[in-house]
Amino acid sequence: VETTPAALEALDSKIAQARELLENLLSARQHVQSHFEDAKSLLHPMRFIPNELLAKIFSHCIVKVHHVEDPDGLDPDPRAAPWLLNGVCRRWRNLATNLPQLW
């Protein structure tokens, strides 16, 4: 019975060390996962589509909106192209704003 407090203290010390090791491992895992996600986004196939092809795809996104108040269909809808395309990423914004057929 006299050795029980010392044994508990030794176990508590080992548990504290194990917790610290676990926290370090979880932190290292998070760091590696973050780098992996960054690398994955750099290699995404969408990055390799030529601007000319994206421009063609963008031109198919244009739909005239017909409202009773706007029979010509010229009312800009912020949920539709080209407004929506401008919000995806810098590359798409640059491409969409420089395509006169979208406007």
Image: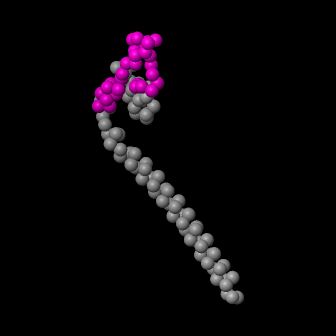
The residue closer to the viewer here, 78 or 43, is 78
Q: Nearer the viewer, residue 69 or 3?
A: 69
Q: Residue at x 32, y 42 (%)?
A: 45
Q: Residue at x 58, y 68 (%)?
A: 19
State yes or no: residue 61 in magenta: yes
> Percent from the top left, x then y, of residue 24?
54, 64
Residue 96 figure quarter: top left
Q: Looking at the image, is 7 positioned above or below residue 28?
A: below
Residue drawn at x 37%, y 18% is 64
Q: Examine the structure image and report whether residue 41 is included in the region drawn in magenta.
A: no
Residue 81 appears at what percent x and percent y?
40, 25
Above/below status of 81 relative to 35: above
Query: Image quarter for residue 46?
Result: top left
Q: Is residue 97 left or right of residue 3?
A: left
Q: Is residue 66 left or right of residue 11?
A: left
Residue 82 is situated, as x and y percent measured from the top left of the image, at 40, 25
* Quarter of the figure with the C terminus: top left
Query: What percent of the width, then of the height, locates residue 15?
Result: 59, 73
Horizontal arrangement in the rendering, residue 19 relative to residue 102 (left or right): right
Q: Residue furthest bottom?
A: 2
Check the picture and name the quadrant holding the N terminus: bottom right
* Residue at x 45% of width, y 19% of height: 76
Q: Which residues are magenta?
A: 53-82
Question: Is residue 94 in sight in this rendering?
Answer: no
Main secondary structure along the magenta-highlighted residues:
loop
> Total label count?
0
Q: Can the viewer see residue 45?
A: yes
What is the quadrant of residue 60 in the picture?
top left
The residue lying furthest to the right in this view is: 2
